């Protein structure tokens, strides 16, 4: 599979380039990149991807948890990283200062290199260090100048003197005004569990994407209307699958956001649903290295679920590399949703659901 590309944007004197966009989001500092096809902004305080939209169309799916004016502190927003964990620390770790979902979204990120254009793509590098966790993450972003496709490569390094367990989850969260009751989530995920399960067997009863039984009701996880239950579900993928993918499609806005990644990097997909006053306000499409929302002691005891590991180990001085691709595309209002995502001939190919399903192709470069 050829590597894909997805990331940010700003226009200076009509030329695609890097910009420090002071005040572009409530006065917060951001790295903003602008290509011919798409624009993305990355918040420095926490490293969240807070904007990804097509040029000429200002619909941004990643508006979740925007701050109040004057709030300049690191925070979780849009697409952020849960790293070095997904979920809560142990009571002692909490006492020692470890935050929920780890430190990556709670520290200032460093920009390592000015974005440069090479072979039709804009690239930039960022770095975060986890002072308690003893890990660092270097992110390389490459955005196609001509097409709305972004490749993200991340290097995880253990800078401590001892090996340790860890997790990393890409917490991509869509929100209004892209998110409404009509939005459809599609994925090739398969078997899963509800995070309401009880240890030591939280995977019982097992569920299967997309329709599940919950409290004597049949819930279709593709669509979120006025009830969030079940709030968090986690899934593995069919045996033999090499890639995982997830998409979010808004028919009224004719826009689709998608991600694709190697399952050897991220074997789990976690779906978070949130409703406020009877309206959907957040949907997390969280692909990562774990599917159990528990502290590390519980993960180590459990080991695996559905044959997939629920944590990773990194030795002292070791570097582990992971990557993913994100993309945007326009689709017609009568689109029925995605049945498959493939890479073929240098293009991302979206296959529509239904016997007469159409194909939509996105060039990668």
Image: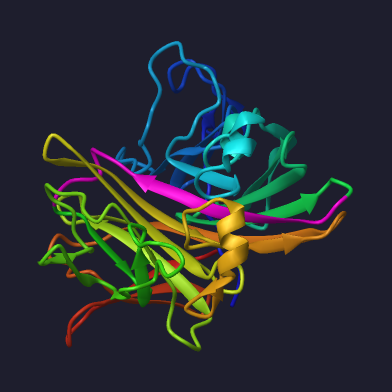
Indicate whether 134 appears above or below 356: above
Horizontally, residue 18 falls left or right of residue 222, namely right
Write down the region rendered in magenta: 162-181
Where residue 214 sits in the image (x, y, percent)? 18, 64
Q: Quadrant of residue 102?
A: top right
> What residue is at 48 percent from the left and 15 percent from the top?
27
Q: Residue furthest top?
A: 70
User: Which color scheme does this rendered protein use?
Assistant: rainbow
Q: In the image, is residue 226 above or below residue 340?
A: above
The reply, left or right, for residue 249 in relation to residue 300 is left
Tell me if 112 is positioned left or right of 304 in this view: right
Picture quadrant of residue 274: top left
- Closer to us: 61 or 254: 61
Q: How many marks?
A: 0
Q: Is residue 304 magenta?
A: no
Q: Give me the residue at 34% from left, 40% from top.
A: 60
- Left or right: residue 45 versus residue 275 is right
Residue 173 located within the stretch drawn in magenta:
yes
Picture coordinates of residue 253 (x, y %)? 20, 49
- Assign the N terminus to one quadrant of the image: bottom right
**Residue 29 to residue 189: above or below:** above
**Residue under the point 66% across and 63% down:** 312
Residue 17 visible: no
């Amino acid at each position: 599979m050829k590597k894909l590309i997805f990331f940010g944007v700003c226009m200076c004197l009509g030329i695609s380039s890097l910009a420090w966009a002071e005040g572009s989001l409530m006065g917060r500092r951001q790295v903003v990149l602008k290509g011919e096809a798409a624009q993305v902004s990355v918040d420095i305080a926490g490293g969240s991807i807070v904007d990804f939209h097509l040029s000429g169309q200002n619909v941004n799916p990643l508006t979740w948890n925007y701050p109040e004016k004057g709030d300049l502190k690191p925070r979780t927003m849009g697409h952020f990283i849960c790293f070095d964990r997904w979920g809560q620390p142990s009571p002692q770790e909490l006492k020692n200062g470890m935050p929920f979902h780890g430190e990556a979204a709670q520290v200032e990120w460093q920009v390592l290199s000015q974005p440069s254009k090479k072979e039709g793509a804009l690239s930039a590098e960022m770095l975060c260090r986890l002072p308690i966790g003893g890990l660092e993450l270097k992110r390389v972003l490459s955005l196609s100048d001509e097409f709305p496709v972004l490749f993200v490569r991340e290097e995880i390094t253990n800078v401590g003197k001892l090996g340790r367990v860890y997790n990393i989850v890409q917490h991509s969260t869509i929100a209004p005004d892209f998110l409404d009751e009509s939005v459809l989530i599609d994925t090739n995920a398969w078997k899963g569990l509800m995070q309401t399960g009880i240890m030591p067997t939280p995977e019982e009863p097992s569920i299967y994407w997309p329709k599940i039984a919950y409290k004597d009701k049949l819930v279709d996880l593709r669509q979120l209307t006025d009830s969030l239950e079940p709030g968090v579900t986690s899934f593995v993928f069919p045996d033999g699958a090499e890639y995982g993918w997830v998409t979010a499609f808004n028919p009224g806005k004719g826009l689709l956001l998608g991600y694709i990644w190697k399952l050897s990097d991220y074997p789990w997909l976690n779906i978070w649903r949130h409703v406020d006053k009877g309206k959907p306000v957040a949907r997390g499409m969280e692909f990562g290295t774990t599917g159990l929302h528990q502290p590390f002691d519980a993960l180590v005891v459990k080991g695996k679920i559905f044959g997939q590991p629920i944590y990773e180990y990194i030795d002292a001085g070791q570097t582990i590399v992971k990557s993913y691709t994100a993309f945007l595309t326009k689709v017609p209002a009568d689109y029925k949703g995605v049945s498959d995502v493939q890479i073929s001939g240098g293009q991302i190919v979206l296959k529509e659901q239904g016997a007469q399903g159409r194909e939509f192709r996105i060039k990668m470069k």
